[in-house]
Structures are given as C-alpha cells and as structure tokens.
Image: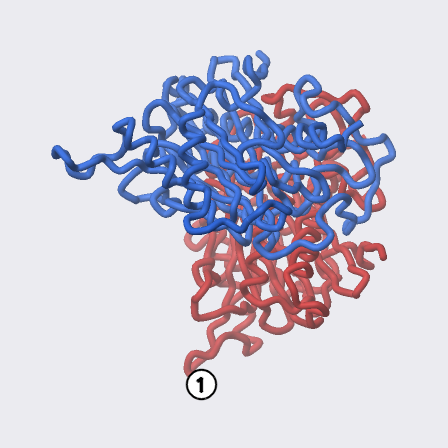
Chain colours: A blue, B red
Amino acid sequence: MATTAGKRNLITDVKGLRVGQAHDVRVNTGVTVILPDQPAVAACAVAGGGPGTRETDLLSAGAMVDQVDAVFLSGGSAFGLGAADGVMAGLKQAGRGFSLVERPGVPPTPIVPGAILYDLANGGDKDWDGIAPYAALGFEAFKAASGTFALGRAGAGHGALAGQFPGGTGSASVVMPEGITVGALACVNCFGSVLMPGTDAYWAWPYEVAGEFGGARPPADFSMDAEDWGAAKANPGLGQNTTIACVATDAALTPSQAQRVAQMALSGFSRAIRPVFAPFDGDAVFVLSTKGVPLPDPDPLMVTRIGELAASTLARAIARGVHEAREQSGAVA
Amino acid sequence: MATTAGKRNLITDVKGLRVGQAHDVRVNTGVTVILPDQPAVAACAVAGGGPGTRETDLLSAGAMVDQVDAVFLSGGSAFGLGAADGVMAGLKQAGRGFSLVERPGVPPTPIVPGAILYDLANGGDKDWDGIAPYAALGFEAFKAASGTFALGRAGAGHGALAGQFPGGTGSASVVMPEGITVGALACVNCFGSVLMPGTDAYWAWPYEVAGEFGGARPPADFSMDAEDWGAAKANPGLGQNTTIACVATDAALTPSQAQRVAQMALSGFSRAIRPVFAPFDGDAVFVLSTKGVPLPDPDPLMVTRIGELAASTLARAIARGVHEAREQSGAVA
C-alpha cells in the first residue's frame, strides 16, 4: 500500500486543524498560528544553537500540561514572542484554555507555545513605538485561521531569508494507507542552503511528491567539496537564522510518543538544509496530535512510521517554502 | 581551498588519538576504545529512543568534569557498559585519570563515557557464566590501541546488523585547509536502511570521497514511496538497534562548542540512515577535542564548519562501516 499527499498538500489536511497567517508589509514580518479545534497533545524539539521560544518548558516530560490550544510561529526575533499575546486574546474570547480554577470570573489560561525567527535586519521598518506589532499580528492571524493558507512570502515566513534565497512558509502532507494524515508547516529562515551546491536540486529531492518544489534532480556526476555550502548565507549572524516548524497528525499520540516524533522530525531539517543546527540557527519543531484517529496498532513501529513521515513531510515543506518564495520573488525561471 | 581526506581516512588521522578494538568470535561481539593521549574535551548527544550509556551525565553543562580519558563503544546491550571497567583498568595502570584527592595510595579516577549497541540476538554464544566478557574485551581493546584499526566486522561493530545487511565499524576523516582534522568512527547496528530504496546507492552518497564506499549513485529517475524503507529491519525490537559513534577533532573546542558540534553531527545519522532516531534505536554520538590546534578563528562560523564536517564525516563513516561489512560477508558483488 502506498502513501499519497493529502488533498490540499497542506498541514490543514490534518482534520481538526486550521492555520491563520497575518503579515505587515511595511515592517516586513508576519505571524503564523496553527490552531487545533480542541486542545491537542504537543511536544517540541529544539536543535539550533540560538532558539527563541515561549512555553516550551511546559511541554517537557512531567510538566503539568500536556495539551496545548495553539502553536505560534513568528518573525520579529524575541519581539515576536509577543504574538502569543494576540493568539491568547483570541482564544480567551472563544472561551478556550486550561482551567486551573473553575469559578465564574476566572478565565481559563490558553496554552500557546511557539518560536520565533530573526527578520529584524531584512529592510523592513522596525521603528515601531511602544508594544511591538506581534501581539496584534497574532490576534489577526488567529481570526484568519482556516483550512487553506498562502505559501511562500506569507505568515511568519513573510520576511525570511533562506540562505541566499528569499525564505518563506512551506507546507506539505501525506496520508498513510490506514487513513492517518501527517502534515508539516515550516517557516524557513535558515543559515544553510536548501540547494545542493552548484545545482538546482533541493537537498530534499528524494522526498519530493509530484513536482511540488519544481522537480529538479542532481546531475549524475554530482560531487562537492565537504566545505562547499552552495547558497548558504555568506555572513551569518548569531541568532539571526532559524527554521521553525510544526508537524501535526490526527493519530492519537501520547505526549511521550509525540516527543519521539519530534526527535525523528528533526531529520527533516538535516535532510533539507546544509549546514543545519549551527550556532547561528534556532531550529525548533513542534508536534501536535489532534487525536481524531486512535493508533490502529499502538506499538513503536507505528510511532516510527509516523516519525519518519514527519521527517520527510517536514523536509518537503522546507523545500516547498523556499521554492514558493523564490517563484514569487522571480528568483526561479 | 578544498578539503581532503586524511592520510589513513580514519578517525586516527586526528593527532593524539588512538583506537583499540577487541572482539570475541564465539560470543559474536566486540569493544572499541577511542583513546586520546591526553584528557580530551568531550560532549555527547543522544537522539535514539532506547539508548544505553555510561557517564554521559558527567558531560552535561555545568558538571564537574569536562575532559575525558577515553570513550568506549561496545556490543552486548547493557552488559557492554562493563567495557568501561576494562578501559579504566588500563588507564589506572597507566596512571591516568582525574585526581579528586592528590595523595599517595589514592588513584586518580579515569573518566570513560561510552555507549552500547544490541547484539544479544545475533546467534553468538551468550551463555557466559558470571561477569560478562565486556570488561575483559575493554581491557584488551585498550591494550591494542594504535593508529590503525580494522573496519567492518570489527570492534563494537563485530556482531552488528545494519538494517538487513551485516553491520560494522566504519571510519573516515577530513582535513580542512587550515590543517584542522575531523574524524569519525561509527558502529552501525541501525534499524533503518543505509541504502536508498531499490538502489545500490548509500543515502550518504553526496558526501562520499574517492569511492570509499563503492561509488554507487541513485538512478536519474529515482523515486520512492514515503513509507518504502528499503532494506530496513523487518521486525525491529525495542532497544535492539543503534548506531553509536565518536567524532574527534584536533581543534581546541570548549565543552560548549563540543556540545554544538555533537548536535550538528547528529545530522550525519539523518543523512545516512532512514528511518533514524526511532523508538527502537539508541543512537548517540560522542565528540572529542584533543586540543592540539588552537581555533584559528574562534568564532561560531568556525564551530559551524567543524560541526558540518562532523556531520558529513560521520555520514561517510556510517556508509563505509556497512559497506566494509557487506564486502567481508560477500554481500556486495
């Protein structure tokens, strides 16, 4: 039995999940919210040397909460961590959150972990006064949540730079023979290159489905020097690069299984970007389980299958995000 | 300026480092010791779901010791953790170790972290009486330490199984234009496959140097289903698979830099093995810095270069270990 891409080839092929995006052209930045209809089991794995995250400690084993109301990804460096304020505002209006005290007048607390990428030096007007625009963008993204969303220069990837190319937001999905869907969304602002040196082929090419990122393949005589990074950034700055991502599945994972899937998903970064996990990068991936489909065979082999699909779908989302951004910017013929 | 492989294309191209191996044909298992002439800065990154390790907590940030006397890799599952006893015996005879109390009659404590792979079900005679053979094998490996060592069915990789192929010990090295050497050694007992499905090409092929693992390339029309794992193990058992590895460099890394290199080196697993980091796997990599060469440009870009070379050299070592084992077993024409 074979896998197929989901109908939209987006993370929103996972039932019970919407995505909202907002961006500000003048500031050249944006926010992405991944919004499950119900609290979702969540996990996170961080592999970059300079991450910017919020509420990730809450996802560690043994912590009080093992479900979240939303995940946000944002531009803006640490300013972007304020995007959660807007997402929490939207969730509060919707009456959602984790109830610590059940009493009238005591609102539940929405649980909204997330991560940021650095886009403060991308030429946008960062001279805002007072509170940074990310809370407002987060609120806007929350309200925009739907089953479809734009790729490329959109959401948290709006002002991103992927190596020497425009970065952006990518997504992809896969459906297993059993009907379980795995989807990924990535906002790609990496230091390393997504292309094999001297070629038009994305490192992720073995995983490509139906030409979703252009179909280029490496030449038969491909070779490279071990220090040829191709189109990586020439002058990376510490903490100025990052690929932040979310993987989602409707398979009912436990928090421990979701954590294993997050670790396996990191291979998606390694297979799509080179170099990766550098001191410059803040690479992080969240995993969400909307729990709609019980694990048909709740053994580690099923977790392995979902984890490997998380890795390959994330690699595809990374390549697709840059490819869409390059096309929109006229950087691909 | 281009990189080259080191003279031996082994981890022992790193000056000040020897490797010793020992194996027991009847038990079908073995031990590998990576032995710096002087205490080396060390770090460790664990990515598999079922690791077996010793003394790794000591390598975490803020712990008392940030240099080690040796690293061991062993077969034998958790029994193999006893290999360190033999390595410590050899180091004690040599008067080496970390002195907590400097007084006659108080021996220094050798610091010997390491990890194991599972080979208890490989058909060898595991019916030993009393203490498992790993302490003795560790002592023997220590005494055998030299600048050259056998690849394939040797050392800790002696009884390994890499997907559906014989597993083994692989190694490779690279020399940077500045003269810094990075070497890797891997004992490959992975659940996943090192070959691209339906091909003779190793996943690590883009990193291959001078046909060191056969030179096969994927066909121009390569495609695969996302769930086609090729020659992965058909019936993996929990904790029965693992790739354990050591990366070494003569560049003088701080413990924090070594930790970043370890994280970056994990991409070598991801690029050489698929699936990887499964619940079945205990994948772990150690990093050693023998500190012979001051970092010529002690900034994060230099750490990034060393980290990416750690990843690619480790990917090469993994492919080479399986390739040598396949050749020795007649599994390659």
> Residue placed farthest to the front in the image?
A129
| Residue A257 appears anywhere in the view | no
Which residue is label 1 attached to?
B102
**Residue at 63% from the left image edge and 46% from the top image edge:** A122
Q: Tell me the quarter of the picture where residue A66 sits.
A: top left
Q: Quadrant of the N terminus of chain A?
A: top right
Q: Is A284 drawn above or below residue A210 in the view shown?
A: below
- Does the rendering let one see residue B168? yes
The one of A305 and B111 positioned closer to us in this rendering: A305
Up/down of B127 relative to B54, above or below: above
Task: Residue A140 in the image: state x and y as whole percent.
Answer: 43, 31
Provide the secondary structure element on which disc 1 rests.
Answer: loop
Q: Quadrant of residue A135?
A: top left
Under mark 1, the amino acid is Glu
Say how many tags the image has: 1
Nearer the observer, A133 or B24: A133
Residue occupying image coordinates x 60% and y 64%: B142
Provide residue B148's location: percent of width, then percent of height. 74, 59
Seen at 49% across and 30% down, the residue is A21
Image quadrant occupied by the C terminus of chain A: top right
Name the residue at 59% across, 51% down: A240
User: Percent position (x, y) of residue B68?
Assistant: 54, 67
Q: Nearer the viewer, residue A242 or A167?
A: A167
